Amino acid sequence: MALSVRSLFFSFLIINSFLNICGQKKKARDTSTIILQPNRIEFEKAANSSDFYVIPGSTNGLLVVEETSESAPQGGYILNVHLTDTAFNVVWSRQDAVPNIESLIGYEYFGGNYYLLFNRNQFKSEQLLVLQYSVRSEEVKTYELTTVFPINIKHFESVGETLLLAGYANYRPVVITYNINDRIPKIVPGFYDNRNDILDLVVEEKSKIFTVVMSEKMRNKKYTVRVKSFNERGDLIQDNLLDPGEKKSLIDGATTTFSGGLQYLAGTHSRKSLHYSQGFYLSKFINGRQQFNKYYPFAELSNFWDHLKPKREERILRRIEKKKEKGKVKKFNYRLLVHEIIQKEGEYIMIAEAYYPRYNHVSNNPYGGIGNFGGVQDSRFTNPYFLGYKYTHAAVVGFDKNCNIIWDHTFRIEDKESFLLEENVAVNASGDKVVLMYLEESEIRSKVIEKGKVIEGRTFSPIKLSYEADELKSEDSSVEKIERWYNNASIAYGEQTIRNEKHAGKTSRKVFYINKIKYSYDFQPD
Protein backbone atom coordinates (compact mmCIF):
# COMPACT_ATOMS: atom_id res chain seq x y z
CA MET A 1 0.00 0.00 0.00
CA ALA A 2 1.38 3.43 -0.95
CA LEU A 3 2.00 5.94 1.85
CA SER A 4 0.01 9.17 1.82
CA VAL A 5 1.74 12.55 1.52
CA ARG A 6 0.81 13.26 5.13
CA SER A 7 2.34 9.97 6.33
CA LEU A 8 5.51 10.69 4.37
CA PHE A 9 5.69 14.16 5.90
CA PHE A 10 5.39 12.84 9.48
CA SER A 11 7.93 10.07 8.73
CA PHE A 12 10.33 12.74 7.51
CA LEU A 13 9.83 14.74 10.72
CA ILE A 14 10.49 11.68 12.90
CA ILE A 15 13.65 10.73 10.99
CA ASN A 16 14.85 14.34 10.98
CA SER A 17 14.28 14.63 14.75
CA PHE A 18 16.17 11.39 15.32
CA LEU A 19 19.12 12.63 13.26
CA ASN A 20 19.11 15.92 15.14
CA ILE A 21 19.19 14.12 18.49
CA CYS A 22 22.08 11.94 17.32
CA GLY A 23 23.87 15.01 16.05
CA GLN A 24 23.38 16.76 19.38
CA LYS A 25 24.75 13.79 21.28
CA LYS A 26 27.77 13.69 19.00
CA LYS A 27 28.28 17.43 19.38
CA ALA A 28 28.08 17.13 23.18
CA ARG A 29 31.12 14.83 23.15
CA ASP A 30 33.55 17.66 22.45
CA THR A 31 37.28 17.05 22.30
CA SER A 32 39.59 19.07 24.52
CA THR A 33 41.22 22.23 23.15
CA ILE A 34 43.86 22.06 25.90
CA ILE A 35 45.08 18.45 25.79
CA LEU A 36 47.88 17.67 23.31
CA GLN A 37 49.45 14.29 22.51
CA PRO A 38 52.89 15.10 21.03
CA ASN A 39 54.55 11.68 21.38
CA ARG A 40 53.66 7.99 21.28
CA ILE A 41 55.68 4.79 21.62
CA GLU A 42 54.54 1.22 20.99
CA PHE A 43 55.85 -2.15 22.14
CA GLU A 44 54.59 -5.18 20.27
CA LYS A 45 52.71 -7.69 22.38
CA ALA A 46 53.89 -11.26 21.87
CA ALA A 47 51.46 -14.07 21.05
CA ASN A 48 52.00 -15.47 24.54
CA SER A 49 50.77 -13.20 27.30
CA SER A 50 53.05 -10.61 28.87
CA ASP A 51 52.54 -7.83 31.42
CA PHE A 52 53.89 -4.31 31.04
CA TYR A 53 54.73 -1.82 33.78
CA VAL A 54 55.55 1.87 33.30
CA ILE A 55 57.63 3.69 35.93
CA PRO A 56 57.77 7.50 35.55
CA GLY A 57 61.19 8.95 36.36
CA SER A 58 60.45 12.68 36.26
CA THR A 59 62.62 14.50 33.67
CA ASN A 60 64.84 11.40 33.41
CA GLY A 61 62.20 9.66 31.30
CA LEU A 62 60.41 6.33 31.77
CA LEU A 63 61.38 2.77 32.56
CA VAL A 64 59.20 0.28 30.66
CA VAL A 65 59.28 -3.28 32.02
CA GLU A 66 57.82 -6.31 30.25
CA GLU A 67 57.36 -9.56 32.16
CA THR A 68 57.39 -12.27 29.52
CA SER A 69 56.61 -15.98 29.75
CA GLU A 70 59.76 -16.76 27.77
CA SER A 71 62.14 -19.11 29.59
CA ALA A 72 65.67 -17.93 30.32
CA PRO A 73 68.56 -20.26 29.27
CA GLN A 74 69.65 -20.87 32.86
CA GLY A 75 66.18 -21.01 34.37
CA GLY A 76 63.60 -18.44 35.28
CA TYR A 77 61.98 -16.14 32.74
CA ILE A 78 62.99 -13.17 30.59
CA LEU A 79 62.42 -9.58 31.65
CA ASN A 80 62.59 -6.97 28.85
CA VAL A 81 63.56 -3.54 30.15
CA HIS A 82 63.63 -0.26 28.17
CA LEU A 83 64.66 3.23 29.25
CA THR A 84 63.22 6.14 27.24
CA ASP A 85 63.79 9.87 27.47
CA THR A 86 60.94 12.38 27.77
CA ALA A 87 60.46 12.39 23.95
CA PHE A 88 60.15 8.56 23.97
CA ASN A 89 63.51 7.96 22.31
CA VAL A 90 64.83 4.61 23.57
CA VAL A 91 68.06 5.27 25.50
CA TRP A 92 68.80 1.57 26.04
CA SER A 93 67.10 -1.82 26.07
CA ARG A 94 68.21 -4.99 27.81
CA GLN A 95 67.06 -8.47 28.78
CA ASP A 96 67.45 -9.89 32.27
CA ALA A 97 66.75 -13.33 33.66
CA VAL A 98 64.53 -13.42 36.72
CA PRO A 99 64.10 -16.57 38.85
CA ASN A 100 60.83 -18.47 38.68
CA ILE A 101 59.01 -16.42 41.26
CA GLU A 102 55.45 -15.15 41.45
CA SER A 103 55.72 -11.73 39.82
CA LEU A 104 56.78 -8.15 40.22
CA ILE A 105 55.22 -6.92 43.48
CA GLY A 106 56.44 -3.30 43.55
CA TYR A 107 58.44 -0.64 41.76
CA GLU A 108 59.79 2.80 42.56
CA TYR A 109 61.92 5.68 41.23
CA PHE A 110 64.17 7.97 43.27
CA GLY A 111 67.12 10.21 42.37
CA GLY A 112 67.99 8.70 38.99
CA ASN A 113 67.46 5.06 40.01
CA TYR A 114 64.58 2.68 39.27
CA TYR A 115 63.88 -0.21 41.65
CA LEU A 116 61.94 -3.41 40.93
CA LEU A 117 60.81 -5.56 43.86
CA PHE A 118 60.18 -9.32 43.52
CA ASN A 119 59.51 -12.29 45.80
CA ARG A 120 62.48 -14.67 45.67
CA ASN A 121 60.34 -17.54 46.89
CA GLN A 122 56.59 -17.67 46.35
CA PHE A 123 56.16 -19.67 49.56
CA LYS A 124 58.38 -17.40 51.70
CA SER A 125 57.30 -13.79 51.53
CA GLU A 126 60.25 -12.70 53.68
CA GLN A 127 62.75 -13.49 50.87
CA LEU A 128 62.90 -10.57 48.43
CA LEU A 129 64.87 -9.57 45.35
CA VAL A 130 65.49 -5.98 44.17
CA LEU A 131 66.82 -4.99 40.74
CA GLN A 132 68.24 -1.47 40.46
CA TYR A 133 68.48 0.31 37.06
CA SER A 134 70.20 3.65 36.61
CA VAL A 135 69.49 6.44 34.12
CA ARG A 136 73.28 6.90 33.84
CA SER A 137 74.23 3.43 32.58
CA GLU A 138 72.83 0.10 31.39
CA GLU A 139 74.29 -1.70 34.37
CA VAL A 140 71.87 -3.50 36.68
CA LYS A 141 72.50 -4.10 40.37
CA THR A 142 70.92 -6.95 42.31
CA TYR A 143 70.07 -7.02 46.02
CA GLU A 144 68.80 -10.07 47.87
CA LEU A 145 67.23 -9.21 51.19
CA THR A 146 65.13 -10.80 53.86
CA THR A 147 62.66 -9.27 56.28
CA VAL A 148 63.37 -12.19 58.68
CA PHE A 149 59.66 -12.79 59.23
CA PRO A 150 56.87 -13.05 56.61
CA ILE A 151 55.38 -9.70 55.62
CA ASN A 152 52.47 -8.81 53.36
CA ILE A 153 53.92 -5.76 51.57
CA LYS A 154 51.47 -2.96 50.74
CA HIS A 155 53.86 -0.04 50.13
CA PHE A 156 57.29 0.09 48.48
CA GLU A 157 59.21 3.38 48.29
CA SER A 158 62.80 4.62 48.27
CA VAL A 159 64.45 7.61 49.89
CA GLY A 160 68.13 8.36 49.21
CA GLU A 161 69.94 5.02 49.42
CA THR A 162 67.27 3.43 51.59
CA LEU A 163 64.41 1.21 50.47
CA LEU A 164 61.17 1.38 52.46
CA LEU A 165 58.84 -1.58 52.94
CA ALA A 166 55.51 -1.19 54.73
CA GLY A 167 52.87 -3.83 55.25
CA TYR A 168 51.54 -6.34 57.75
CA ALA A 169 53.06 -9.17 59.78
CA ASN A 170 50.61 -11.30 61.75
CA TYR A 171 47.94 -8.74 60.80
CA ARG A 172 49.88 -5.95 62.52
CA PRO A 173 51.50 -3.00 60.71
CA VAL A 174 55.26 -2.94 60.23
CA VAL A 175 57.72 -0.59 58.47
CA ILE A 176 61.22 -1.75 57.45
CA THR A 177 64.18 0.25 56.09
CA TYR A 178 66.89 -1.38 53.97
CA ASN A 179 70.06 0.55 53.15
CA ILE A 180 71.51 -0.66 49.84
CA ASN A 181 75.07 -0.06 51.07
CA ASP A 182 75.14 -1.93 54.39
CA ARG A 183 72.34 -4.28 53.21
CA ILE A 184 70.86 -4.62 56.69
CA PRO A 185 67.08 -4.47 57.14
CA LYS A 186 65.90 -2.51 60.19
CA ILE A 187 62.46 -2.43 61.76
CA VAL A 188 61.20 1.12 62.35
CA PRO A 189 59.87 1.18 65.95
CA GLY A 190 56.41 2.34 66.95
CA PHE A 191 54.19 0.53 64.41
CA TYR A 192 53.58 -3.05 65.61
CA ASP A 193 50.20 -2.32 67.19
CA ASN A 194 46.84 -3.94 66.46
CA ARG A 195 45.08 -0.57 66.92
CA ASN A 196 46.74 0.90 63.80
CA ASP A 197 46.45 0.54 60.03
CA ILE A 198 48.86 2.03 57.49
CA LEU A 199 47.04 4.34 55.06
CA ASP A 200 49.92 5.80 53.06
CA LEU A 201 53.69 6.23 52.76
CA VAL A 202 54.91 9.58 51.37
CA VAL A 203 58.50 10.57 50.46
CA GLU A 204 59.92 14.11 50.22
CA GLU A 205 62.74 13.81 47.68
CA LYS A 206 64.75 16.96 48.48
CA SER A 207 64.88 16.61 52.27
CA LYS A 208 64.94 12.76 52.13
CA ILE A 209 62.19 12.54 54.72
CA PHE A 210 59.43 9.93 54.63
CA THR A 211 56.03 10.16 56.30
CA VAL A 212 53.74 7.31 57.35
CA VAL A 213 50.00 8.03 57.61
CA MET A 214 48.04 5.69 59.90
CA SER A 215 44.51 5.13 61.08
CA GLU A 216 44.42 4.67 64.86
CA LYS A 217 41.68 3.41 67.16
CA MET A 218 41.14 5.58 70.23
CA ARG A 219 40.00 4.62 73.72
CA ASN A 220 36.47 5.83 73.04
CA LYS A 221 36.38 3.31 70.13
CA LYS A 222 36.37 6.09 67.54
CA TYR A 223 39.18 6.52 65.01
CA THR A 224 41.70 9.22 64.27
CA VAL A 225 44.77 9.70 62.06
CA ARG A 226 48.39 9.65 63.21
CA VAL A 227 51.24 10.96 61.04
CA LYS A 228 54.89 10.09 61.71
CA SER A 229 57.84 11.59 59.81
CA PHE A 230 61.34 10.05 59.71
CA ASN A 231 64.72 10.79 58.19
CA GLU A 232 66.43 8.42 55.76
CA ARG A 233 67.91 6.36 58.63
CA GLY A 234 64.48 5.79 60.16
CA ASP A 235 64.92 8.23 63.07
CA LEU A 236 61.66 9.83 64.23
CA ILE A 237 61.41 13.56 63.47
CA GLN A 238 57.77 14.33 64.18
CA ASP A 239 54.73 12.46 65.53
CA ASN A 240 51.34 14.11 64.93
CA LEU A 241 48.12 12.69 66.36
CA LEU A 242 44.94 14.44 65.25
CA ASP A 243 42.39 15.28 67.90
CA PRO A 244 39.05 14.80 66.12
CA GLY A 245 36.88 15.81 69.05
CA GLU A 246 34.35 13.67 70.89
CA LYS A 247 31.75 13.24 68.14
CA LYS A 248 33.94 12.57 65.08
CA SER A 249 35.83 9.64 63.59
CA LEU A 250 38.49 10.27 60.96
CA ILE A 251 38.25 7.57 58.31
CA ASP A 252 41.37 8.24 56.28
CA GLY A 253 43.94 10.91 55.52
CA ALA A 254 46.45 12.27 53.05
CA THR A 255 49.35 14.51 53.94
CA THR A 256 51.62 17.08 52.39
CA THR A 257 55.34 16.44 52.63
CA PHE A 258 57.07 17.52 55.83
CA SER A 259 58.66 20.92 55.10
CA GLY A 260 60.13 23.35 57.61
CA GLY A 261 57.97 21.95 60.40
CA LEU A 262 54.76 22.65 58.44
CA GLN A 263 52.40 19.87 57.47
CA TYR A 264 48.79 19.69 56.26
CA LEU A 265 46.41 16.75 56.51
CA ALA A 266 43.17 16.21 54.62
CA GLY A 267 40.70 13.37 54.53
CA THR A 268 37.16 12.29 55.29
CA HIS A 269 35.25 12.09 58.55
CA SER A 270 32.19 10.34 59.88
CA ARG A 271 30.29 10.02 63.12
CA LYS A 272 30.16 6.23 63.41
CA SER A 273 30.84 4.31 60.21
CA LEU A 274 34.37 3.54 59.04
CA HIS A 275 33.10 2.91 55.50
CA TYR A 276 30.86 5.90 54.78
CA SER A 277 32.10 9.46 55.15
CA GLN A 278 29.92 12.52 55.79
CA GLY A 279 32.37 15.24 54.82
CA PHE A 280 35.98 16.42 54.57
CA TYR A 281 38.35 17.58 57.27
CA LEU A 282 41.43 19.80 56.87
CA SER A 283 44.12 20.10 59.51
CA LYS A 284 47.33 22.09 59.97
CA PHE A 285 50.38 21.21 62.08
CA ILE A 286 53.40 23.38 62.93
CA ASN A 287 56.36 21.65 64.60
CA GLY A 288 54.16 18.77 65.69
CA ARG A 289 51.41 20.89 67.21
CA GLN A 290 47.90 20.82 65.79
CA GLN A 291 46.79 24.37 64.97
CA PHE A 292 43.21 23.54 64.12
CA ASN A 293 40.96 20.93 62.56
CA LYS A 294 38.20 22.18 60.24
CA TYR A 295 35.21 20.10 59.15
CA TYR A 296 33.22 20.54 55.95
CA PRO A 297 30.04 18.44 55.56
CA PHE A 298 29.23 17.58 51.95
CA ALA A 299 26.04 19.67 52.20
CA GLU A 300 28.11 22.83 52.80
CA LEU A 301 30.19 22.52 49.63
CA SER A 302 29.28 24.76 46.69
CA ASN A 303 29.52 22.38 43.73
CA PHE A 304 29.52 18.90 45.25
CA TRP A 305 26.47 17.92 43.17
CA ASP A 306 27.39 19.39 39.79
CA HIS A 307 28.17 15.95 38.32
CA LEU A 308 24.48 15.01 38.60
CA LYS A 309 21.70 15.65 36.14
CA PRO A 310 20.10 19.10 36.70
CA LYS A 311 16.76 17.85 38.06
CA ARG A 312 18.42 15.52 40.55
CA GLU A 313 20.82 18.26 41.65
CA GLU A 314 17.86 20.61 42.21
CA ARG A 315 16.08 18.03 44.39
CA ILE A 316 19.17 17.58 46.58
CA LEU A 317 19.71 21.32 46.93
CA ARG A 318 16.07 21.76 47.99
CA ARG A 319 16.51 19.13 50.71
CA ILE A 320 19.66 20.91 51.92
CA GLU A 321 17.81 24.22 52.10
CA LYS A 322 14.88 22.72 54.04
CA LYS A 323 17.30 21.35 56.65
CA LYS A 324 19.08 24.71 56.79
CA GLU A 325 15.81 26.50 57.51
CA LYS A 326 15.43 24.27 60.56
CA GLY A 327 18.99 25.05 61.68
CA LYS A 328 20.27 21.60 60.73
CA VAL A 329 22.76 20.18 58.23
CA LYS A 330 21.59 17.55 55.74
CA LYS A 331 23.76 14.42 56.04
CA PHE A 332 25.06 12.45 53.06
CA ASN A 333 27.09 9.24 53.15
CA TYR A 334 29.77 8.35 50.58
CA ARG A 335 32.56 5.85 50.21
CA LEU A 336 35.58 7.90 49.12
CA LEU A 337 39.13 7.03 48.10
CA VAL A 338 41.39 9.96 49.03
CA HIS A 339 44.42 10.86 46.87
CA GLU A 340 47.70 12.46 47.88
CA ILE A 341 47.52 16.25 48.37
CA ILE A 342 48.91 18.40 45.55
CA GLN A 343 50.74 21.61 46.49
CA LYS A 344 50.91 24.58 44.12
CA GLU A 345 51.76 28.25 44.68
CA GLY A 346 50.24 28.68 48.13
CA GLU A 347 47.21 26.53 47.34
CA TYR A 348 46.54 22.90 48.20
CA ILE A 349 44.37 20.48 46.24
CA MET A 350 42.82 17.29 47.50
CA ILE A 351 40.86 14.81 45.40
CA ALA A 352 38.67 11.89 46.45
CA GLU A 353 36.94 9.35 44.21
CA ALA A 354 33.46 8.12 45.11
CA TYR A 355 32.79 4.41 44.63
CA TYR A 356 30.63 1.54 45.81
CA PRO A 357 31.16 -2.25 45.86
CA ARG A 358 28.98 -4.37 43.58
CA TYR A 359 27.74 -7.86 44.43
CA ASN A 360 25.83 -10.57 42.63
CA HIS A 361 23.58 -12.45 45.05
CA VAL A 362 23.53 -16.07 43.88
CA SER A 363 20.96 -18.54 45.17
CA ASN A 364 21.87 -21.62 47.21
CA ASN A 365 18.22 -22.64 47.49
CA PRO A 366 18.17 -26.48 47.39
CA TYR A 367 14.55 -26.36 46.22
CA GLY A 368 15.28 -24.16 43.21
CA GLY A 369 14.12 -20.63 42.64
CA ILE A 370 16.00 -17.56 43.76
CA GLY A 371 15.86 -17.86 47.51
CA ASN A 372 12.78 -15.68 47.74
CA PHE A 373 9.73 -16.82 49.68
CA GLY A 374 6.45 -14.90 49.81
CA GLY A 375 8.19 -11.83 48.39
CA VAL A 376 10.77 -11.85 51.21
CA GLN A 377 14.38 -12.75 50.42
CA ASP A 378 15.71 -15.53 52.65
CA SER A 379 19.39 -14.80 53.42
CA ARG A 380 20.01 -18.49 54.21
CA PHE A 381 19.90 -19.25 50.50
CA THR A 382 21.91 -16.37 48.99
CA ASN A 383 25.66 -15.78 48.83
CA PRO A 384 27.07 -12.43 47.64
CA TYR A 385 29.75 -12.64 44.96
CA PHE A 386 31.96 -9.58 44.72
CA LEU A 387 31.84 -8.06 41.22
CA GLY A 388 34.26 -5.18 41.81
CA TYR A 389 34.15 -1.49 42.62
CA LYS A 390 32.09 0.92 40.56
CA TYR A 391 33.32 4.54 40.45
CA THR A 392 30.82 7.38 40.10
CA HIS A 393 32.65 10.71 40.40
CA ALA A 394 35.63 12.54 41.86
CA ALA A 395 35.36 15.46 44.27
CA VAL A 396 38.11 18.08 44.02
CA VAL A 397 38.73 20.72 46.69
CA GLY A 398 41.15 23.65 46.71
CA PHE A 399 42.11 25.09 50.10
CA ASP A 400 44.46 27.79 51.41
CA LYS A 401 47.17 27.80 54.11
CA ASN A 402 44.51 28.33 56.80
CA CYS A 403 42.49 25.31 55.62
CA ASN A 404 39.68 27.42 54.20
CA ILE A 405 38.07 25.88 51.13
CA ILE A 406 38.50 28.29 48.20
CA TRP A 407 36.63 26.25 45.60
CA ASP A 408 35.24 22.78 44.98
CA HIS A 409 34.04 20.84 41.94
CA THR A 410 33.19 17.31 40.90
CA PHE A 411 34.15 15.25 37.86
CA ARG A 412 31.80 12.53 36.67
CA ILE A 413 33.37 9.08 36.18
CA GLU A 414 31.57 6.69 33.85
CA ASP A 415 32.16 3.05 32.93
CA LYS A 416 35.05 2.57 35.39
CA GLU A 417 35.09 -0.66 37.39
CA SER A 418 37.92 -2.62 38.99
CA PHE A 419 38.46 -5.47 41.44
CA LEU A 420 41.15 -3.48 43.25
CA LEU A 421 40.39 -0.19 44.92
CA GLU A 422 42.67 2.17 42.98
CA GLU A 423 42.99 5.76 41.80
CA ASN A 424 41.60 6.44 38.33
CA VAL A 425 41.62 10.22 38.01
CA ALA A 426 44.95 11.96 37.37
CA VAL A 427 45.30 15.59 38.46
CA ASN A 428 47.79 17.96 36.89
CA ALA A 429 48.09 21.43 38.41
CA SER A 430 50.13 24.17 36.79
CA GLY A 431 49.76 27.91 37.34
CA ASP A 432 46.10 28.73 37.89
CA LYS A 433 44.80 25.69 36.01
CA VAL A 434 43.87 22.22 37.24
CA VAL A 435 43.35 19.44 34.68
CA LEU A 436 41.36 16.32 35.69
CA MET A 437 41.58 13.22 33.49
CA TYR A 438 40.86 9.53 33.38
CA LEU A 439 41.18 6.98 30.58
CA GLU A 440 38.37 4.72 29.40
CA GLU A 441 38.20 2.70 26.17
CA SER A 442 41.14 4.57 24.56
CA GLU A 443 39.52 7.92 25.29
CA ILE A 444 40.82 10.68 27.56
CA ARG A 445 37.93 12.15 29.51
CA SER A 446 38.83 15.50 31.02
CA LYS A 447 37.75 18.68 32.76
CA VAL A 448 39.74 21.91 33.23
CA ILE A 449 39.37 24.35 36.14
CA GLU A 450 41.00 27.76 36.45
CA LYS A 451 40.88 29.72 39.73
CA GLY A 452 37.95 27.59 40.83
CA LYS A 453 35.95 28.13 37.62
CA VAL A 454 35.32 25.53 34.92
CA ILE A 455 36.91 26.81 31.69
CA GLU A 456 36.51 23.55 29.79
CA GLY A 457 33.73 21.17 30.76
CA ARG A 458 33.69 17.43 30.27
CA THR A 459 35.51 16.49 27.04
CA PHE A 460 36.35 13.25 25.23
CA SER A 461 39.71 13.05 23.38
CA PRO A 462 40.57 9.80 21.54
CA ILE A 463 44.02 8.36 22.16
CA LYS A 464 46.15 9.43 19.21
CA LEU A 465 47.42 6.51 17.11
CA SER A 466 50.83 6.27 15.40
CA TYR A 467 49.77 6.52 11.74
CA GLU A 468 47.00 8.27 9.83
CA ALA A 469 45.73 4.99 8.35
CA ASP A 470 45.63 3.23 11.75
CA GLU A 471 42.23 1.97 12.82
CA LEU A 472 41.56 1.00 16.42
CA LYS A 473 39.86 -2.41 16.58
CA SER A 474 39.86 -3.11 20.33
CA GLU A 475 41.46 -2.22 23.66
CA ASP A 476 41.86 -3.82 27.07
CA SER A 477 40.16 -1.42 29.49
CA SER A 478 41.49 -3.33 32.52
CA VAL A 479 45.07 -2.07 31.96
CA GLU A 480 44.34 1.51 30.84
CA LYS A 481 45.66 4.30 33.02
CA ILE A 482 46.72 7.95 33.16
CA GLU A 483 49.51 9.11 35.48
CA ARG A 484 51.21 12.39 36.25
CA TRP A 485 54.78 12.52 34.97
CA TYR A 486 56.67 15.82 35.31
CA ASN A 487 55.80 19.54 35.14
CA ASN A 488 52.69 19.76 32.91
CA ALA A 489 53.22 16.34 31.30
CA SER A 490 51.33 13.11 31.99
CA ILE A 491 51.25 9.66 30.37
CA ALA A 492 48.39 7.50 29.15
CA TYR A 493 49.05 3.82 28.51
CA GLY A 494 47.29 0.55 27.75
CA GLU A 495 46.88 -2.27 25.25
CA GLN A 496 45.34 -1.91 21.79
CA THR A 497 44.73 -4.00 18.69
CA ILE A 498 45.22 -1.83 15.59
CA ARG A 499 44.55 -2.48 11.92
CA ASN A 500 46.27 -0.66 9.05
CA GLU A 501 45.44 -1.80 5.50
CA LYS A 502 48.12 0.47 4.01
CA HIS A 503 50.96 -0.87 6.15
CA ALA A 504 53.70 -2.59 4.16
CA GLY A 505 54.03 -5.45 6.66
CA LYS A 506 51.34 -6.92 8.89
CA THR A 507 47.95 -5.28 8.56
CA SER A 508 47.11 -5.98 12.20
CA ARG A 509 49.20 -5.47 15.32
CA LYS A 510 48.66 -5.81 19.06
CA VAL A 511 50.64 -3.28 21.07
CA PHE A 512 51.29 -1.84 24.48
CA TYR A 513 51.27 1.91 23.92
CA ILE A 514 52.34 4.97 25.88
CA ASN A 515 51.13 8.44 24.85
CA LYS A 516 52.61 11.61 26.24
CA ILE A 517 50.03 14.21 27.27
CA LYS A 518 50.78 17.91 27.57
CA TYR A 519 48.58 20.96 27.96
CA SER A 520 48.26 24.10 25.85
CA TYR A 521 47.63 26.62 28.61
CA ASP A 522 47.42 29.51 26.13
CA PHE A 523 43.81 28.52 25.40
CA GLN A 524 41.34 31.34 26.06
CA PRO A 525 37.65 30.41 26.55
CA ASP A 526 35.02 32.24 24.51
Image (cartoon, helix red, strand yellow):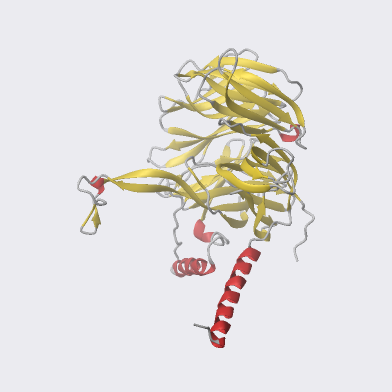
In the image, residue 18 above or below residue 403: below
Residue that extends furthest to the front in the rendered view of this protein: 1
The C terminus lies in which quarter of the figure?
A: bottom right
In the image, residue 134 above or below residue 493: above
> Which of the two residues, 523 or 400, is positioned nearer the viewer here?
523
Would residue 41 be found to the left or right of residue 189 on screen? Answer: right
Residue 408 location (% of width, % of height): 60, 56
Q: Does residue 231 show up? A: no
> Which of the two residues, 136 or 157, is positioned nearer the viewer here?
136
Residue 293 location (% of width, % of height): 54, 47
Residue 24 location (% of width, % of height): 62, 68
Would residue 409 be found to the left or right of residue 91 on screen? Answer: left
Q: Quadrant of residue 93?
A: top right
Q: Does residue 34 show up? A: yes
In the image, residue 513 above or below residue 282: above
Residue that extends furthest to the right in the rendered view of this protein: 522
Residue 298 location (% of width, % of height): 51, 57
* Tally of numbered tags: 0
Q: Quadrant of residue 411?
A: bottom right
> Which of the two residues, 164 or 41, is positioned nearer the viewer here?
41
